[in-house]
Amino acid sequence: AQSVTQPDIHITVSEGASLELRCNYSYGATPYLFWYVQSPGQGLQLLLKYFSGDTLVQGIKGFEAEFKRSQSSFNLRKPSVHWSDAAEYFCAFTDSWGKLQFGAGTQVVVTP
Amino acid sequence: GAVVSQHPSRVICKSGTSVKIECRSLDFQATTMFWYRQFPKKSLMLMATSNEGSKATYEQGVEKDKFLINHASLTLSTLTVTSAHPEDSSFYICSALNLAGVSYNEQFFGPGTRLTVL
């Protein structure tokens, strides 16, 4: 079955420390992959996406993600987090014309 | 570019009434829009796919008579929650699919509508 898994429900990180959010997908071919961020009570903002080409993708707000076909993973990273990065992060993929499937989300808490 | 708006942002209604939520693509044409529902601290659940000029396609388990979707123009889709009950209280988010240019196959999300049914 097609699915996307975010193993970490909740991550706490100190401001200035690095952050890595895990995402694994299950799909027979290479999907289109996305990372979204959601602040409380808000809609979703796209951080970055992978369709093809370079497997290291740069996004907004200093985020990057690496697509690893062998591991069926698309982990999100940021070298140094800011307090404003506290939010819910969703990994998602689409296998066709735009129908997205989301992971369960990872809540990121940033401590001083 | 690629801005999607939703109106209203919050709505409180009495049980048994109907509520309409609008989703608009402000600067692009969207032949396809999607409606999601999100419970507190949960992920987004796709409710239906809305295609301009045709009937919406509902996901399994979503009552199409409860959640009426209309996509009458290339920039507007509406979700009407009919005879709302407290269990319909949720955060509803729409998105619009941009099939043009560099944003090909990317969904742009509205800010969401918080529905509370008393």
Image (cartoon, rainbow, N blue to C red):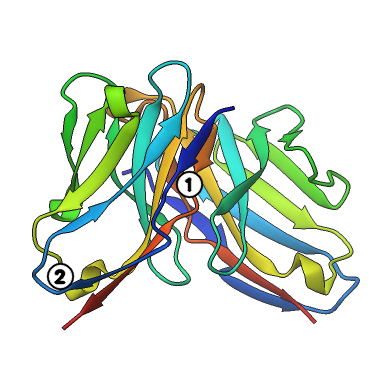
Residue type at the position of mark 2: His
Q: Give the secondary structure at mark 2.
A: loop
Q: Distance between the residues labelled 2 and 1?
A: 23 Å
Picture coordinates of residue B10, whole percent (x, y) = 60, 74
Relative height, residue B101 to residue A111 (above, below): above
Q: Quadrant of the C terminus of chain A?
A: bottom left
Mark earlier in primary sequence (2, 1): 2
Query: Mark 2 Cα within 10 Å, few/some/many (few <14, many 20+)?
Result: some
Picture coordinates of residue A75, whole percent (x, y) = 27, 42
Residue marked by disc 2: A82
Q: Give the secondary structure at mark 1.
A: loop
Picture coordinates of residue B115, whole percent (x, y) = 67, 70
Picture coordinates of residue B44, whole percent (x, y) = 56, 52
The quarter of the picture where residue B6 lies is: bottom right
Q: Is residue B76 left or right of residue A39?
A: right
The quarter of the picture where residue B61 lies is: top right
Number of numbered discs on residues: 2
The quarter of the picture where residue B22 lies is: bottom right
Q: Which mark is residue A103?
A: 1
